[in-house]
Amino acid sequence: MKLTTEQIDQLFLFTRQHYVEWYDLQSELVDHLANAIETDWEQNPTISFEAALQNEFKKFGVFGFVDVVEKRRGVLKKKYYKIVCEYFKDFFSFPKIISTIAAILGLFIILKLSVNSRYIFIGIYLLLFVAMFYELYKNHQNRKKRKKSGQKRWLFEEVIHNYGYLAGALSFPFNMMSQVFYQSDDFFIYDYEAMGLSFFLISFGVFLFIIFKIIPSKAESYLLATYPEYKLE
């Protein structure tokens, strides 16, 4: 026996009812459940569709599809981090490294020569921080609109456009900023301190530029590479 189109639609609805919101995962789970149910029918033709579905769903354990979702999210996050690292390394490779070094040295000179170097550092950092939260807010609004529109959602697309998990990465610069606030006015007396903070600010700016501008601008190509069926959208 083969599943009907109506039963396939029921399987998609079943995955959505069990908190699988992404079309790519829905498709994989529906394919798995359909094959399993058809196998069950070969062994026991009298079993109903609903009973066979519940039997297969129980095999996923107490948490249902949660583990499947988290495992796939973990795989796609690693893929995303690899992309970020490749772009980041590109800024420290020839020829872009020339511009990167020039920016670091330029900021270093400003910090060393200015009598208000601490406040320049804080000002630039806050500017980057505000820009980051603006992008987060804009992205959140776009995601809400997309969800309301009823368009298909793809897990890797969410990974690319969801920056909430970067909060941990931001704890380090936040701690550095706190240190600056409580340091004495001669904080930049040593060259290596000014150079270190210049490197940190430029690197942080590059990092934000990559995750908020470069990768989102190329999101469609990454989604097409991950999901060939995405082009049908």
Image (cartoon, grey):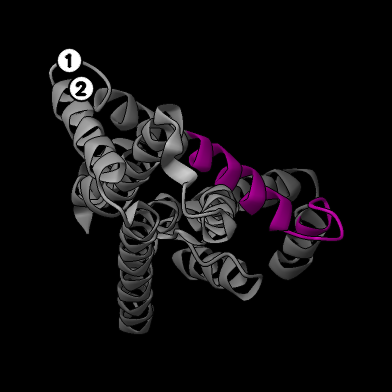
Any part of residue 94 in sight = yes
Quadrant in which residue 137 is drawn: bottom left
Q: Quadrant of the C terminus?
A: bottom left
Which residue appears at 39% of the width and 29% of the height?
A: 191
Q: Is residue 61 left or right of residue 15?
A: right
Is disc 1 in contact with disc 2, using a CB cutoff of under 8 Å?
yes
- How far apart, in angstroms, are the residues tagged by discs 1 and 2? 5 Å
Q: Which of the numbered marks, if any, corresponds to residue 97?
A: 2
Give the camera-side residue of 87 and 132. Answer: 132
Q: Is residue 61 magenta?
A: yes
Please tell me which residue lies in front, 168 or 3. Answer: 168
Which residue reaches farthest bottom? Answer: 148
Q: Position of residue 24 (x, y in %)?
A: 45, 52
Segment tinted magenta in the rendering: 57-78
Return the x and y of residue 85 as percentages of the image width and height.
Answer: 39, 30
Residue ID at (76%, 60%): 64
Give the secondary structure at mark 1: loop
In the rendered image, which residue does mark 1 sit on?
94
Task: Relative to 115, say whether 75 is above or below.
Answer: above
